[in-house]
Amino acid sequence: MSDWDKKTAAEVVFELGSDPEKGLSKEEAQNRLQRFGKNVLKEREIRSPLSILLSQFTSVMVIMLLIAGVVSVFLGETVDAVAIFAIVVLNSILGFVQEFRAEKALQALKRLAMPKVRVCRNGVVADAPAQDLVPGDIVLLEAGSNIPADGRLLEAVNLRVQEAALTGESEPVDKESKPQAMAAHGAVPDGEHRAKNMVFMGTAVVAGRGRMVVTETGMRTELGKIANMLQTTKREPTPLQKRLERMARELAIAVLVIVAIVFILGVLRGQNYREMFLVAVAMAVAAVPEGLPAVVTIGLTLGARRMLGRNALIRRLNAVETLGSVTVICSDKTGTLTQNRMTVTVLDVAGEKCDLQVVRAKGDKVEGCHYLSPTMLLLVAAGALCNDALIAVDAGEMKVLGDPTEGALVLAAMELGMEPNQLRRLLPRVGEIPFSSERKRMSTIHQLKIEGPVAEKERVVFEILKARDDGELVLFTKGAVDVLLKLCRGVYVNGEVEPLTEVWRQRITEALTNLTAQGIRVLGSAFRMVKEVEVTETGGIGEGLESNLIFIGMSGMIDPARPEVKDAVKVCREAGIKPVMITGDHPLTALFIASDIGILNRAEPNWQERCLTGEQLRELPFERLKSIVERVVVFARVAPEDKLAIVKALQEKGEVVAMTGDGVNDAPALKKADIGVAMGITGTDVAKEAADMVLLDDNFATIVAAVREGRAIYENIRKFIRYTFASNTGEIVAMVFAPFFGMPFPLGPLQILWVNLVTDGLPGLALGVEPPERDVMQRPPRRLNESIFAHGMGFNIIWSGIFLGLVSLGVGYWAFIKGREDWRTMVFTILIMGQLLHSLALRSQRDSFFKMKLLGNPVLIGTFLLTFGLQLLVIYSPVLQRVFRTQALPVSDLIVALLASSVVFFAVEVEKALRRVLNRTAAKQRS
């Protein structure tokens, strides 16, 4: 932003070449439109559908699968080839759909601008398209209108603007037309003023009226700068994508080595070159886990479906798994951790205090607070009467029309059993002095009058005022406490008025300090009786009446935390995830909410250092920010650029970052983060389009369910990899070591492909839908650079694969030296059945199979039985015997093969039991 806010309105209009009364001429406006362009947010060049589709075929794994498919065609294995190509096409289509939808993010920004605005040109006010606005245009603003461009205020009458979507602040901002340096409240730090004489595109007027001169349009506006950040922010690959790409590269090298070894060994033994080439290629195809993309896609898709049932819409499939890797959740405060609704939490009058939060926490009905004193009732009535907010009922839900702070006072009166409409009938308004940021107060004058039946609490208020014998009219004033105290002569205490002594001033000031230290916004209320008052035709009264007031008390309010957030934060911490609050609100408010929900522990030494303001952040070099960012849990008074810097700093420290938010200001950080989570109800279209996941119920706790789902999916992918790689290792061991025992190769090319496609495929896919394990949320997050084979899985693959290969080869060798012609079928069957039983043992990587529900994964049981039946057909069907070169096994040999196959299952169960014992021993030593 330039220094328009530091200049007078006349200077701004002069520099822009405009007229404050007449505006621009139509000719000049047209010339400027050609020079500056339309007042729209430009879209970057969208990638063509063809380029998006082609990009789906560039990963190492996909290239390997394509090669495997071509080789399968060459071998004449049409079924295998069709299966591989189908997997590649399905995976590519899903990726294409997700990326094409992501290209729409910028289009949502354009919907924030008003299509029509009231603009003054040639001295005539008329409606004009917002896209035709140019710098120098004079635009009229009124309550309910959206700001169509950035502008400098020329006039502001009780003007309040809601800037939450742009700045993240929950409360509307009071606007004024004076230069910042000349503001009545004096100079204030840059981080505090938020340019009170400037208004910005994408924000909305909630009260008052004004006139602005347009200073910036289109991409030069503050909203345009955010749009530019959004389109220049590159989306990072997910942790799963990185791990699978690395695994694919390593696997490609291993495949080449396997092909070379098998081919050379066969040639050295005098085998036919063409036969050995087919065997070697078949081994290479077998080593490629072509089912992996399908497992990932199916697992993520089913996870996304389950999340939709929990009110979380997944926009990118990989987002589900990425949440399982998250180490930090950067959450916007307003509307995400809080309810985005100002609520009265404290009533404080002389001699008593009512903490409404305690009442609500106990589950008591607040309207049951019959112990409220007459003074407390008078305070509530004053807040509801000296008030311009209205309450409307839409679809059974009450909504505030007007200022959120005033709405909170009216809702508090209703919650405490006082009907605002009845109060207004008892005490009709006859005059007012409106609120202004210079006066920091508002006053209304009411006539005491009774018509019809009156409820008990309203009657108490009426009787208090009627008992005063110094007038038939009552003046209520509400505003900043320090301002009201200067206008008061007394304090209302237990039905009597006591002089406002220094002792009372000190008591009130101390109570005010205690409340504001908790981040609570405080408004004071006062009254006086008036005998006569001169009211103008517009309902105005003289400010001289605002003297000799009687102080009633204070109303404290805050945007409270969502009730479910505390538990969600606790679960996050147990899962090793650090929640971080990032907000545009005041540090005191942010600290109070953070402490209330458990993000910040005030009992820690130097807990204040865990909060950083946007102003402090901007003064830090990026390297310094990186060094302290892991210590900070609350960022207050931040701008969109600050959020982006925070996410980048955390990512460079090796963190996997999730960013939640709902405003336009969150969009760049949502896109930059490893996963962006937008609010579905309060979120802007921009945030939703930039995010990977949308919470349909705006429930922070839904993220915890997503983390659990993501961790389960990743563990299932690891189970599949362990299962299929161990199986492939067993095949390779059998093929490589057979020549050393003087045996021919035990498996032919077609048998290898059968094992790879049927046995590895069906049970492997079933492992991908295994339910989450019981302790999945008690484990720490995975490190970003962690291999997919970490935590001993690589070793487990090697030993179990070698064990399976040696067992099958050992039994085959026994049959071979006995001169049995069915020895190859024995090896073939043991490899198949050993892998099937291995899949059962891998349902859990910690718990015993015998302690799990047998039908906990019915898909796996079904594929187990199906594959077992298919293998029996291959062995005993005459037609399939000729195709696969198998021989029927006697029942005794089949039993031997089944017993030998179960050895691997029990070996894995023993290994898990030993690991449980070691983990318990280690836990006891730590304790």
Image (tube, rainbow, N blue to C red):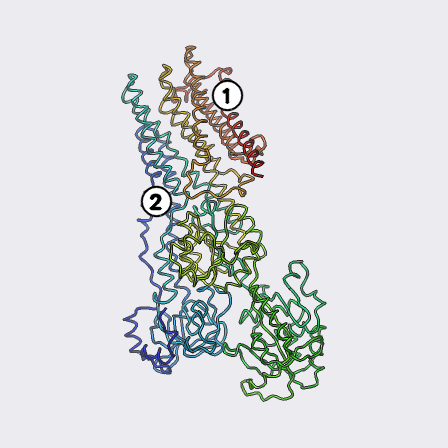
Q: Position of residue 195 (x, y in %)?
A: 42, 71
Question: What amino acid type is highlighted by mark number 1?
Answer: Leu
Identify the residue shown where x is 47% and y is 23%: 872
Establish if 451 lies above or below 91.
below
Q: Is residue 121 left or right of residue 449?
A: left
Q: CA distance from mark 1 to mark 2?
A: 43 Å
Assess disc 1: are there few (<14), some (14-19) or many (≥20) residues with their C-alpha within 10 Å of its C-alpha.
Answer: some
Q: Quadrant of residue 410?
A: bottom right
SS under mark 2: loop
Q: Position of residue 132 (x, y in %)?
A: 34, 71
SS under mark 1: helix
Out of 142 and 3, give the one closest to the viewer. Answer: 3
Q: Which numbered disc covers residue 56?
A: 2
Out of 385 and 689, give the one closest to the viewer. Answer: 385
Q: Is residue 133 left or right of residue 893?
A: left
Decide which of tag 1 and tag 2 comes sooner along the chain.
2
Identify the residue shown where x is 44% and y is 64%: 166
Q: Is residue 78 left or right of residue 826?
A: left
Q: Position of residue 481 (x, y in %)?
A: 58, 74
Question: What amino acid type is highlighted by mark number 2?
Answer: Gln
Dividing the image into 4 quarters, which one contains the N terminus? bottom left
Q: Is residue 426 left or right of residue 226?
A: right
Q: Are marks 1 and 2 in contact (CB under 8 Å)?
A: no
Q: Position of residue 405 (x, y in %)?
A: 55, 70
Q: Is residue 878 visible?
A: yes
Identify the residue shown where x is 51% and y is 20%: 899
Judging by the rendered image, the residue that carries numbered circle 1 is 898
Establish if 509 lies above or below 646.
below
